[in-house]
Amino acid sequence: NSSNNSNNHVSRNGSGADVSCLTARGLPKQELIRLIEQALEELGYQDAANQLQRDSNTRACAPDVMKFRDAVLAGDWTRADASLLQLDAFDSRATLTHARAVIGEQKFLELLEASRSEDALGVLQAEIAPLYAKPPSRSDSEHENGAYAWQNKQHLHHLALLLMCRTSAEVRENAKWA
């Protein structure tokens, strides 16, 4: 059901977007379809989202992003980290390092919540702490690097204190993790 210009000329707006791909309100159709698809999935209407995907020939996320998302949702942290490294979505090494640290923290918190303190300690020592070991190279300022190191030290200290929690509820409360 696509309409073509009879002269095969594509009209574009100021941003370079194909005007024939805009909705009546000026929204890019592909983006609107992606938003609707994501909303359907979040509401639990996976079949409807899949049908929209087939009918529109549009995916809510790129295949690499879907692999990453599925790994995170499954708690498959090894696969999540490998998928993350394959994504072409990071503007700097520091941003990638931060994303890996967030994944490590999620793994750490889930282990604590499951009362697996020894495994959580191993993740903190072997996976999270090394990511915070040195400041990003984007600034040569000693003051900024010192502040970065101090902030990381405080954060690591906070994570280590979570190991003292006795219950899952206590972990969630102290981590401000719902």
Image (tube, rainbow, N blue to C red):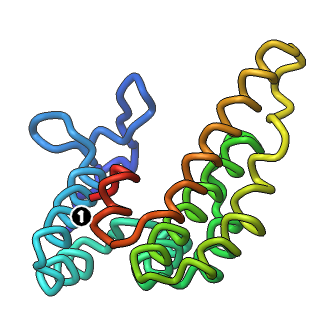
Seen from the viewer's position, the closer of residues 87 and 4 is: 87
Q: Is residue 88 left or right of residue 20?
A: right
Considering only vertical position in the picture, is 18 above or below 77?
above
Residue at the spot 71% in from the left edge and 51% down from the top edge: 97
Residue at the spot 60% in from the left edge and 42% down from the top edge: 155
Residue at the spot 38% in from the left edge and 63% down from the top edge: 171
Q: In this view, does 25 lie to the left or right of 75?
A: left
Q: Residues within 10 Å of mark 1 (few under 14, many from 20)?
A: some
Seen from the viewer's position, the closer of residues 147 and 89 is: 147
Mark 1, residue position: 38
* Callout 1: SS: helix
Q: x, y percentage for residue 94?
A: 73, 41
Q: x, y percentage for residue 84?
A: 63, 66
Considering only vertical position in the picture, is 27 above or below 15?
below
Considering only vertical position in the picture, is 130 above or below 154?
below
Seen from the viewer's position, the closer of residues 86 and 77 is: 77
Residue at the spot 81% in from the left edge and 27% down from the top edge: 138
Q: x, y percentage for residue 99?
A: 60, 53
Q: Is residue 120 left or right of residue 40?
A: right
Quadrant of residue 58 within the rendered picture: bottom left
Q: Which amino acid does label 1 sit on?
A: Gln
Q: x, y percentage for residue 81?
A: 65, 72
Considering only vertical position in the picture, is 94 above or below 162?
above
Quarter of the figure with the C terminus: bottom left
Q: How many labels does the image show?
A: 1
